[in-house]
Image (cartoon, rainbow, N blue to C red):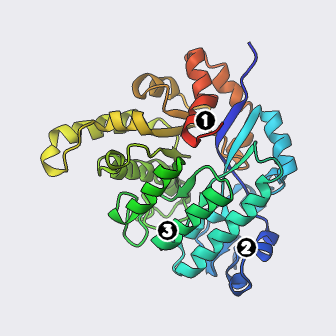
Amino acid sequence: MSRIPAIDADGHVQEPADAWRRHLDQRFWPYAPRTERDDQGRVRQVVGGELKPLVPSPGGGDWEIPTGGHDPAQRLADMDRQGVERSLLFPTFGLFFAGLERSDVQAALCRAYNDWLREFCAADPKRLVGVALVPQRDLGEALAEARRCVRELGFRGVMMRPNPVLGRSLGDPLWEPLLALLEEEGVPLAVHEGTTQDLPQSGRDRFENYALRHVCSHPHEQQIACAALVMGGALERHPGLRVVFLESGCGWLPHWLERMDEHMHGWGHAIAKLPLTPTEYFRRQCFVSCDSNERTLPGVVALAGEDVVVFATDYPHPDALAGDLVGRIWDHPDLSATAREKILRTNAMRCFGLA
C-alpha cells in the first residue's frame, strides 16, 4: 500500500535579512531581527533592538540552516523528498517577538513577517500554508492582524506563545475577543513555545544551562496553557474554537488529561463548574503534534484518542533532517492503518480547515 501524502502541522521558515528591508516600515528598520557575534564569538539573536539570551546551536552557531528555510522552491523540493504534501509554516526569529517590550515594534515586526510569509507561500499556496503571527502585548493590534491575515492573506491559523505576556495567560479574559474571532473565522489557535528565555518560562528560574531550560519549557508551558484554556472554560465558551499544541511532543497529554480530570472532580469546589470533563473538551476541540520517533505515540493514541494527534517535522531545524520522518509513522507496527492516516493527514486537515 502506497503512502498517503503527509501534512506537516509544524514546519518553520528562517526569515532572511532582506525580508525586513522589503516589508518593514522604514521607521522600524533599526529593530529588524539579525544575528551578530558577542564578545566571546558566539552567534546571538538581536530582535527589536534587544540582544537576546544565548541559544546554543550545533557547531557553536556555524550550523548551516537548510536553504528551504527561506527559499520556497528548495522547500518544496525538500517536502517532496520527505513525502510531505503540505506544510503549515511558523517563524524562527518571530518566536522572539512576544518578549519584546515595545508594543509598536512588536506589531510592526509581526506585520512585516506576515507580509513576507505571504510572499513565500505564493510559490505554491496549496502546499505552503501560512499561520499568522500576532502581537501579544496589544489586543487591538492582535485582532487587526489576525483579521488581515485570515481574510486578506488566506492564512489558516493564528500562532501565540503559551507564556504569560504582561502577566496574562492565554486563558485570561482579555483574549476572549480573539478566541471569538478565531472561532468565527474557522481557524485554530496554534500554541507554539520557543525557549527564547525572555518571558516567564518553566526552567528559566532555576537553570542556567540551556538544555535544562529547553527540556522543561516546551511541554510544561503547553500543559499550563492547556489547563488555562480547558479548565478556565474557554473551550466551553467557544465550542467551535480549535486549538493545537505544537513542538512539545505528545507524550505529556494522557497524563495531563487524567490530572485535569481528577482535579475537576476532586477540586471542583475551587473552580467554575463545567458540563464536560477536560478530556472531553480536548477530544472535541484540540490537537497535539507528535515527534515521529516518540516511543509513547501508540500509548497516546490508545489513551487520548487517534483523532487528536497531528504529524510535524519542525523543518528546517536539525531534528527535521534525521531520517524518514513520514515513514516512521506510516510503517509503525503498533498503529492501525486508520490511526496512521489520521495522524499523517486527516487530523491536520480538520484542525486547520484545509480542503
Residue 26 image position (x, y, % from top left): 74, 84
Picture quarter with the C terminus: top right
Q: Earlier in the sequence, mark 1 or mark 3?
A: 3
Q: Is residue 245 above or below residue 297?
A: below
Q: Is residue 210 above or below residue 102?
A: above
The answer, for residue 63, to whether it is visible in the render is: no
Q: CA distance from mark 1 to mark 3?
A: 27 Å
Q: Residues within 10 Å of mark 3 (few under 14, many from 20)?
A: many
The answer, for residue 158, to whether it is visible in the render is: yes
Q: CA distance from mark 3 to mark 2?
A: 21 Å
Picture quarter with the N terminus: top right
| Count of numbered tags | 3
Q: Amino acid at mark 2?
A: Arg
Q: Earlier in the sequence, mark 1 or mark 2?
A: 2
Residue 164 figure quarter: bottom left
Give the farthest residue toward the left: 269
Residue 327 figure quarter: top right
**Which residue is identified by label 3?**
136
Near-viewer residue (128 or 256): 128
Give the residue drawn at x 33%, y 49%: 237
**Which residue is identified by label 2?**
34
**Which residue is identified by label 1?**
349
Q: Amino acid at mark 1?
A: Met
Q: Is residue 33 above or below residue 295?
A: below
Near-viewer residue (22 or 75): 22
Residue 346 image position (x, y, % from top left): 60, 29
Q: Earlier in the sequence, mark 3 or mark 2?
A: 2
Report the side of 49 relative to 139 (left or right): right
SS at badge 1:
helix
